[in-house]
Amino acid sequence: MGAEKGGTDKAAARRLLAKIRAFVANQLDEEEATLFAALVAPGVARAYHDHGEVEGFSSDVDWRPGALPESLAEAVREGRIRVEGLVDE
């Protein structure tokens, strides 16, 4: 992943966010959208925190690790969901 090369990473990030918005708007019901928000909220909060803004700014989702609904945490564990390949080595 590394440094941005000619805006390629920025363009990819914008495309990804557009796809996520469309996915949430068109594919998820209200309960699923709430769970999805709980799942991604720590990353969103981090984006704001790293730029000196208040954690959780513009969010009504409780993003603290302990706030992840147990039903979602259990589904993640049972599905053996892992995030891999995001760290430069």
Image (spheres, rainbow, N blue to C red):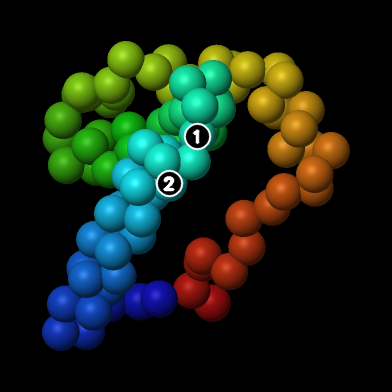
| The image quarter in which residue 42 lies | top left
Q: Position of residue 6 (x, y in %)?
A: 15, 84
Residue displayed at 17% across by 42% down: 51
In this rendering, does residue 43 appear at all?
no
Relative to residue 7, is residue 44 depicted above or below?
Answer: above
Q: Nearer the viewer, residue 57 or 13?
A: 13
Instruction: Using residue 56 as the reference point, say whether residue 42 is left or right of it.
Output: right
> Residue 77's mark?
none
Residue receiving disc 1: 28
Determine the residue located farthest toward the bottom in the rendered image.
Answer: 6
Q: Which residue is mark 2?
A: 23
Circle 1: is it few (<14), some (14-19), or many (20+) Cα within 10 Å? some
Horizontal side of residue 48 vs 73, given as left or right = left
Res 1 seen here: yes
Q: Position of residue 58 (x, y in %)?
A: 20, 23
Amino acid type at image mark 1: Leu
Q: Secondary structure at mark 1?
A: loop
Location of residue 49 (image quadrant): top left
Establish if 56 lies above or below 87. Answer: above
Quadrant where the image shows the C terminus: bottom right
Amino acid type, residue under disc 2 in the picture: Phe
| Residue closest to the eye, 86 or 76 | 76
**2 or 1: tag closer to the N-terminus:** 2
Residue at the far right in the pictured view:
78
Measured as percent of width and height from the top left, residue 72 is found at: 67, 26
Q: Are marks 2 and 1 in contact (CB under 8 Å)?
A: yes
Point 16% across, 30% down: residue: 53
